[in-house]
Image (cartoon, rainbow, N blue to C red):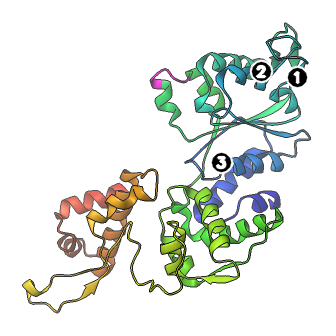
Amino acid sequence: MKAIEEIILGNSLAVKEMKKLIEMVSVSNTAVLIQGETGSGKELVAEALHVASGRKGNNISVNCAAIPAELLESELFGHEKGAFTGADRARPGRFEQANDGTIFLDEIGDMPLPLQSKLLRVLEGRKVQRVGSSKEIDVNFRLVCATHQDLDKKVETGEFRADLFYRINVFPIEVPTLAARAVDVPILIKGIVEKIKFSGQEINVNFSEDALKVLSNYSWPGNVRELRNVIERASVLFNDRVVSGDNVKDNLLRLKVPDPDEEQDELWAASTALVETDSEEKGEEQVSLPIPKAEQYKDWFLYFDKMDLRRHLSEIEIVMIEAALLKTDGSVSQASDALKLRRTTLIEKMKKYGISK
């Protein structure tokens, strides 16, 4: 569907599968729960669902985490004049505004428990009652929710109502991380630049092939939102210039004003360093290879607020296992020797990550 293609950019397998799910469910009135990491583009999926649905009403978005708990009820359901201090006039809530359209409840995992029960009643009866009123108002809406949290765990701990969870989790859609769809980075860059230009901001940034390779291999803890930040950073530092791979590592993935007289011959100090392989002890020819030093990771938090350590280590394991198998033409025994692992341990890890010979 053209509308979905225009909103959701990318041709990776993960994105293609997500687009199929969006197209399948868009024409129905089924509740959709969008799950994914912060910055992965959940709001774009919600937009695509609404546009593809053909519903005549508006697509109304509410960030449940951004509105104080004491104001969220009034924001969702509206209020009558005099309902509380400062309510000098009646005001329709977001559900009324979404009549014949879509209401998108972003970060629904942050909704307070007392309000969850009121939301459940609205979903069951398709009627809202404004704060300060006893009158019920019929509403026709399509519900789309999103969260980056594990709602299953929140249900177990009692922080999220189980009955509400089952009501909103009718058709789940998982948004892939940017690291999982790295092949889409060039397409996303082009789309982001066009959006920035459309907003009226002048931008003329070109990324070299080497720069695109570096960007595609980056782990993107902040996902697409972080990519947009990098592009905007590039528009300030390298407007009307071609961005090189070294520029990306030294000036964009960590903020540093480029010095044209400085030799950019060091790898990104936050994560890697050049070390020499000590092969003399083994009587082998000494070769200089770019191998990360473990102690370099202590600088990570100088540039970033957090790290998904479990995912990062898993990604390293996958890359190294696949590289060892490629080098040994698929021989598990030789690959386990190269990795200094027991053969059975390597086989278990291959099963865990779905790696074939």
Q: Nearer the viewer, residue 294 or 4?
A: 294
The amino acid at mark 2 is: Ser
Is residue 14 depicted above or below 235 in this figure?
A: above
* 116 relative to 37 in the view: left or right: right
* Residue shown at 26% from the left, 61% from the top: 347
Instruction: State which tag comes first along the sequence, 2 or 3.
Output: 3
Quadrant where the C terminus lies?
bottom left
Instruction: State which tag comes first along the sequence, 1 or 2.
Output: 2
158 inside magenta stretch: yes
281 inside magenta stretch: no
Quarter of image, res 311: bottom left
Q: Which residues are magenta?
A: 156-160
CB under 8 Å between discs 1 and 2:
yes
Could you classify mark 2 by the number of other residues whose Cα lies within 10 Å: few (under 14), some (14-19), or many (20 or more)? many
Instruction: State which tag comes first along the sequence, 1 or 3.
Output: 3
Residue bearing mark 2: 74
* Residue shown at 59% from the left, 27% from the top: 165
Q: CA distance from mark 2 to mark 3?
A: 25 Å
* 301 relative to 92 in the view: left or right: left
Could you classify mark 3 by the number of other residues whose Cα lies within 10 Å: few (under 14), some (14-19), or many (20 or more)? many
Position of residue 302 measured from the top left corner of the image (x, y, whole percent): 41, 58
Residue bearing mark 3: 42
Position of residue 189 measured from the top left corner of the image (x, y, whole percent): 66, 70
The amino acid at mark 3 is: Lys
Residue bearing mark 1: 91
